[in-house]
Image: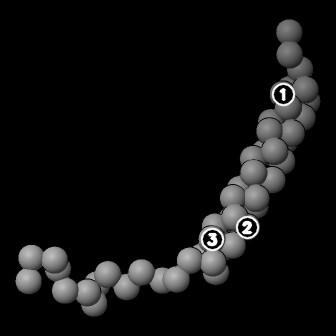
Amino acid sequence: MIDLSDEVYRQQQQISQLETKVRHLAERLQLIATLEPANDSIDEIPPHY
């Protein structure tokens, strides 16, 4: 039988891992955003004109 404290510990470990992954993804997105020029397709004329 799993004790409540064991389950809470397991969940906290999982939360910590997920926070690390989210932080890593946010850093990668920020890097990509700074490397790629903004695509302002809203101001572009559609190709059929």
Residue 19 in view (yes/no): no
- Where is 9 relative to 48, above or below? above
Label 1's element? helix
Please state which of the two labelled residues, at mark 2 or mark 1, is closer to the viewer.
2
User: In the rendered view, would you say 48 is above or below 44?
Assistant: above
Instruction: State if disc 1 and disc 2 touch (CB < 8 Å).
Output: no
Q: Earlier in the sequence, mark 1 or mark 3?
A: 1
Determine whether label 3 and label 2 are within 8 Å by CB.
no
What residue does disc 1 label?
7
The quadrant holding residue 34 is bottom right
**Residue at the spot 90% in from the left edge and 34% down from the top edge:** 9
Q: CA distance from mark 2 to mark 1?
A: 30 Å
Contact? badges 1 and 3 (CB < 8 Å): no
35 vs 42, left or right, is right
- Residue 46 visible here: yes
Provide the residue designation for mark 3. Answer: 32
Instruction: Choose the circle earlier in sequence order: 2 or 1.
Output: 1
The quadrant in which the C terminus is found is bottom left
- Residue at x 76% of width, y 58% of height: 24
**Could you tell me residue 36's position as x and y percent?**
56, 77
Gap between marks 3 and 2 measured at Cα: 9 Å
Q: Position of residue 43 (x, y in %)?
A: 28, 90
- Identified by mark 1, the residue type is Glu
Mark 1 to mark 3 CA distance (whole Å)? 37 Å
Q: Residue at x 69, y 58 (%)?
A: 25
In the picture, the disc for residue 27 is 2
Amino acid under disc 2 = Glu
Structure colour scheme? one colour
Q: Secondary structure at mark 2?
A: helix
